[in-house]
């Protein structure tokens, strides 16, 4: 299942690590307002910059997903 994760700092980073290990989950994009947090999460997820966004609207123009997971701190 393709997933877009919104919020990747703090609690979101925990979810990111867990989701990456779950069979059948393919995280296709990350979204966060904080560019530094987003860069750190991209490293954790081994994602390139073209899969990382600061705005959900930009993400949805580039990717489709079966689920959007929003995490907050």
Image: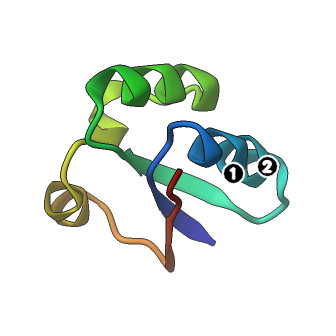
Q: Residues within 10 Å of mark 1 (few under 14, many from 20)?
A: some
Give the residue at x 58% y 26%: 46
Q: Is residue 62 left or right of residue 39?
A: left
Does the residue at mark 1 contact the one at mark 2 (Cβ under 8 Å)? yes
**Quadrant including the N terminus:** bottom right
Query: Is residue 6 positioned above or below 39 on the image?
Result: below
Nearer to us in this view, 5 or 33:
33
Q: Is residue 11 left or right of residue 7?
A: right
Q: Residues within 10 Å of mark 2 (few under 14, many from 20)?
A: few
How far separated are the C-alphas under marks 1 and 2? 5 Å
- Element at badge 1? helix
Question: Circle 2 sits on which residue?
Answer: 18
Question: Circle 1 sits on which residue?
Answer: 15
Residue furthest to the front in view is 73
Give the x, y percent position of residue 16: 65, 45
Give the residue at x 35% y 40%: 51
Q: Which mark is residue 37?
A: none
Give the residue at x 32% y 27%: 49
Give the residue at x 47% y 53%: 28
Nearer to us in this view, 60 or 7:
7
Query: Is residue 8 positioned above or below 60 on the image?
Result: above
Query: Is residue 48 positioned above or below 67 on the image?
Result: above
Give the x, y percent position of residue 69: 52, 68
Give the x, y percent position of residue 6: 42, 57
- Element at badge 2? helix
């Amino acid at each position: 299942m393709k997933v877009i994760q919104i919020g990747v700092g703090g609690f979101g980073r925990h979810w990111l690590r867990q989701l990456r290990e779950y069979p059948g989950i393919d995280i296709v994009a990350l979204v966060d307002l904080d560019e530094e947090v987003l860069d750190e999460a991209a490293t954790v997820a081994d994602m390139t910059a073209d899969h990382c966004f600061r705005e959900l609207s930009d993400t949805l123009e580039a990717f489709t997903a079966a689920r959007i997971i929003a995490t907050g701190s």
